[in-house]
Image (spheres, helix red, strand yellow):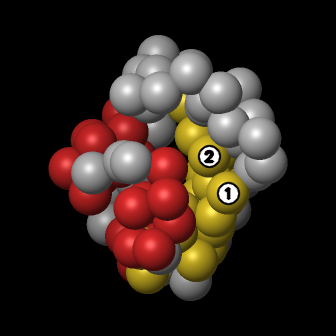
Amino acid sequence: MKKELTGTKPPFEVIPLTTALVSDGKIIEQNLEKLNISKEWLVESLKASGVKSLSDVFYAGMQKDGTVYVDFREDKV
């Protein structure tokens, strides 16, 4: 199931490109640093979109508009 988080905005204004934050259940820390995002902010944002465990996330990325896109490992139909 793909879900877009719309309620929480990051601590910055504009993101020039979509940036991967989680890949195959692992946080990409260097991208967090580039965007000045804390792990705590990311984890809370993922929880708000229904993520129970990082291992459930196939991909999560910060979109150009500042929203977090999440693609779950197992889509639930």
Left or right for 23, reference 32: right
Q: Secondary structure at mark 2?
A: strand
Q: Please state the horizontal and vertical placement of residue 76, each as a whole percent of the image.
A: 64, 57
The residues bearing labels 2 and 1 have C-alpha atoms spaced at a distance of 5 Å
Looking at the rendering, which quadrant does residue 41 occupy?
top left
Find the residue positioned furthest to the top: 7
Left or right for 16, reference 49: right
- Tell me if mark 2 has few (under 14), some (14-19) or many (20+) residues whose alpha carbon lies within 10 angstroms of its own: many
Q: Nearer the viewer, residue 53 or 34?
A: 34
Cβ–Cβ under 8 Å for marks 2 and 1? yes
Q: Nearer the viewer, residue 9 or 69?
A: 9
Q: Which residue is drawn at the image coordinates 59% and 58% (left, top)? A: 60
Three-letter amino acid code of the residue under disc 1 = Thr
Q: Please state the horizontal and vertical placement of residue 40, each as a whole percent of the image.
A: 20, 50
Q: Which residue is drawn at the image coordinates 49% and 50% (left, top)? A: 35
When the figure is inspected, residue 76 is found, relative to residue 59, above or below; the finding is: above
- Tell me if mark 1 has few (under 14), some (14-19) or many (20+) residues whose alpha carbon lies within 10 angstroms of its own: some
Left or right for 28, reference 77: left
Q: Which residue is drawn at the image coordinates 45% and 74% (left, top)? A: 30
Q: Which mark is residue 19?
A: 1
Q: Which residue is drawn at the image coordinates 32% and 66% (left, top)? A: 53
Q: Which mark is residue 62?
A: 2
Q: Please state the horizontal and vertical placement of residue 5, each as a whole percent of the image.
A: 55, 30
Three-letter amino acid code of the residue under disc 2 = Met
When the figure is inspected, residue 3 is found, relative to residue 72, above or below; the finding is: above
Looking at the rendering, which quadrant does residue 14 occupy?
top right
